[in-house]
Image: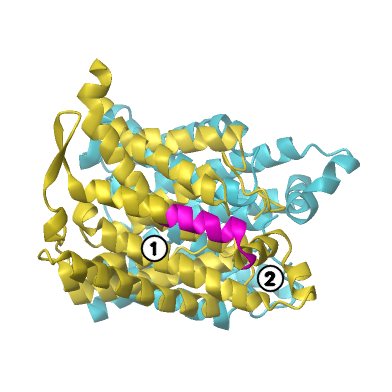
Chain colours: A yellow, B cyan
């Protein structure tokens, strides 16, 4: 227990970061899995969520206002996701998708910098969750534990919808064989629009929830994008469980790794990713429905 | 462009490039120098991405090996530029061989992500290694000489000519390789990797050879970068540079080598020069350029005129 005692806070921080990364990355993964679109503007979506938090509840609002802001962020994200889906629908080549979405990300970064300035902004946790509780004798922020709880609830809901409902069955079928889904009379464009909307909504929501942990600043978009890409690729593209496992791994590497091997964390992160990909090129838990995992 | 015209155009372009310092002032010359060094990096990305169908975000690693090697040789051994070039290219090729042995086992998006990891690892290594200056960068590189014991190159025009020579050498290697049997095999990997073994070709060896050649070209670009700036910092190896190098390839028209070069020139001019007129909005302009290019130039700059550009699809 000595080791756990010494590193408890790092481990807990790892879970909190994993929760946020899961929320943000799962959308990236599903959009790639269903639409075959590599959305490099995904980090910008979550930074937009974070800045919405700065503008609406930055100084510590009531829990009700915070929830309202979170819902608003999700709606904004869904709209932006629908717009991105419309923009990318005609473009099938991954490299041109990358060119387009990175272009959008560069534009978004400059617009956000113009609106909110270059200085890092802080977001306070809602008043009711601002304190700490004792976890095994150590004080730990309630807000971070709540983030984990929210991510667990959303993850379970997502899993239920995808695996147990008809809508989920259609999405899974689109991942497996888009042409066949079209052939049985379902407009795959609508499915794709829905998935992109939900994925983007989760990214902005995750960004807003990350505000009290990571803050909001220029450059956070590409940091988050890189982490989310690592999560998705390590976990396996197009898979919810993969995104969860990837997020847990990356979360621990980024927090426990930093505290155990200071200065080596990002080295560990990309080293771990390279190792996973060389051993399991399709990721640790690839989507069982995708027919081509290592395919571009 | 008709085939018969190509050699004439190439000769004319090279002559203009050679004559530039006679007409331009030092500032625009340093801009063209930067374009040539970055352009050679982009050509190395195109050798993998366009010609071989392996989209890479990792060439910055070998560019970095070349740049840092040239700098370290310059600080500790000799100010002789050809020696720095040879050392940089050799080390970059060795680094590409060692990492490529693992990396080329993957393809597609996984290749993209593994090369991203290689690039980022190199970036962090440069940032953390005190022997090469750490996060402060490698400073104090003396001005280079071309002949042993010769005069150091201090004037922008002379540095430019050296960088141009390295660029032409690297470009020649890329063109010769791309037209050689190896180049045809690389295109074969892009178009139908599964069929090559049936023809008795070993795709692993082809991809590794392509990776080493591309790494060596990127290393040469790195030494040229150092020769001009006489300073290397970890920021030169950032993810954003890799991303912009890959996007220059797509913007220019992947697989044509000269198209990506134009793409690189457009990207550098837009980001570094036009941005001066709209202070602080370089990234915004670049973003608009990328978005417009995706819709307006579906096959990149090179594809907008030529009919015979092969369809570019990563395997």
In this view, the residue farthest toward the right is: B199
Quadrant of the rendered image containing residue B255: bottom right
Q: Secondary structure at mark 1?
A: helix
Q: Secondary structure at mark 2?
A: helix
The chain holding disc 1 is A
Asked if one can make out residue B19 in the rendered structure from this viewpoint, the answer is no
Q: Which residue is label 1 attached to?
A: A203
Q: Is residue B289 left or right of residue A264?
A: right
Q: Is residue B91 left or right of residue A219?
A: right
Which mark is in front, 1 or 2? 1
Q: Which residue is label 2 attached to?
A: B6
- Where is residue B46 shown, x and y percent of the image? 59, 56
Answer whether residue A155 is magenta in the image. Answer: yes
Q: Which residues are magenta?
A: A154-166
- Where is residue B151 shown, x and y percent of the image? 30, 43
Between the residue at mark 1 and the residue at mark 2, the CA separation in whole angstroms equals 49 Å
- Where is residue B188 shown, x and y percent of the image? 78, 51
Q: Is residue B100 left or right of residue B126?
A: right
Quadrant location of the N terminus of chain A?
top left
């Amino acid at each position: 227990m000595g080791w756990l005692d010494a590193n408890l806070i790092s481990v807990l921080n790892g879970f909190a970061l994993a929760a946020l990364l899961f929320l943000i990355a799962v959308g990236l993964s599903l959009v790639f899995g269903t639409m075959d679109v590599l959305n490099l503007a995904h980090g910008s979506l979550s930074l937009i969520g974070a800045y919405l938090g700065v503008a609406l509840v930055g100084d510590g609002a009531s829990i009700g206002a915070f929830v309202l802001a979170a819902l608003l962020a999700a709606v904004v994200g869904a709209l932006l996701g629908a717009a991105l889906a419309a923009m990318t629908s005609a473009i099938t080549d991954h490299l041109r998708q990358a060119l387009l979405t990175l272009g959008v990300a560069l534009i978004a970064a400059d617009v956000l910098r113009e609106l909110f300035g270059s200085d890092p902004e802080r977001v306070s946790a809602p008043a009711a969750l601002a304190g700490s509780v004792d976890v095994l004798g150590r004080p730990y922020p309630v807000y971070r534990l709540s983030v984990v709880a929210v991510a667990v609830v959303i993850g379970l809901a997502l899993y239920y919808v995808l695996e147990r409902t008809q809508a989920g069955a259609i999405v899974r079928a689109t991942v497996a064989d888009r042409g066949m889904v079209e052939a049985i009379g379902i407009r795959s464009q609508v499915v794709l629009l829905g998935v992109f909307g939900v994925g983007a909504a989760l990214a902005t929501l995750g960004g807003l929830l990350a505000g009290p942990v990571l803050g909001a600043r220029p450059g956070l978009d590409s940091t988050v994008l890189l982490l989310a890409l690592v999560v998705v690729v390590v976990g396996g593209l197009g898979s919810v469980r993969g995104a969860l496992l990837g997020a847990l791994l990356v979360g621990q590497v980024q927090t426990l790794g930093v505290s155990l091997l200071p200065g080596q964390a990002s080295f560990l992160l990309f080293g771990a990713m390279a190792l996973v990909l060389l051993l399991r090129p399709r990721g640790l838990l690839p989507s069982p429905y995708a027919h081509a995992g290592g395919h571009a | 462009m008709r085939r018969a015209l190509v050699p004439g155009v190439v000769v004319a372009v090279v002559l203009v490039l050679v004559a530039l310092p006679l007409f331009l002032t030092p500032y625009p010359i340093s801009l063209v120098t930067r374009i040539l060094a970055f352009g050679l990096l982009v050509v190395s990305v195109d050798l993998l991405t366009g010609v071989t169908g392996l989209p890479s975000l990792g060439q910055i690693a070998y560019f970095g090996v070349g740049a840092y090697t040239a700098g370290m040789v310059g600080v500790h051994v000799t100010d002789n530029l050809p020696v720095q070039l040879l050392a940089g290219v050799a080390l970059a090729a060795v680094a590409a061989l060692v990492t490529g042995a693992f990396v080329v086992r993957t393809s597609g998006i996984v290749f993209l992500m593994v090369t991203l990891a290689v690039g980022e690892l190199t970036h962090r290594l440069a940032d953390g290694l005190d022997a090469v200056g750490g996060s402060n960068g490698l400073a104090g590189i003396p001005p280079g000489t071309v002949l042993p014991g010769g005069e150091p190159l201090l004037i922008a025009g002379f540095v430019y000519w050296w960088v141009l020579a390295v660029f032409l050498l690297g470009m020649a290697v890329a063109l010769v390789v791309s037209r050689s049997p190896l180049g045809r095999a690389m295109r074969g990997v892009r178009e139908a990797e599964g069929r090559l073994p049936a023809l008795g070709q070993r795709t692993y060896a082809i991809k590794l050879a392509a990776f080493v050649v591309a790494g060596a070209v990127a290393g040469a670009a790195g030494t040229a970068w150092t020769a001009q700036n006489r300073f290397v910092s970890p920021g030169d190896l950032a993810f954003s540079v890799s991303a912009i190098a890959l996007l220059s390839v797509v913007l220019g028209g992947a697989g044509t080598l000269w198209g990506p070069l134009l793409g690189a020139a457009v990207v550098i001019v837009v980001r570094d020069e036009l941005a001066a007129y709209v202070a602080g909005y370089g990234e915004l302009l670049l973003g608009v350029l990328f978005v417009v290019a995706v819709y307006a130039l579906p096959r990149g700059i090179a594809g907008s005129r030529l009919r015979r550009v092969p369809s570019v699809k990563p395997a």
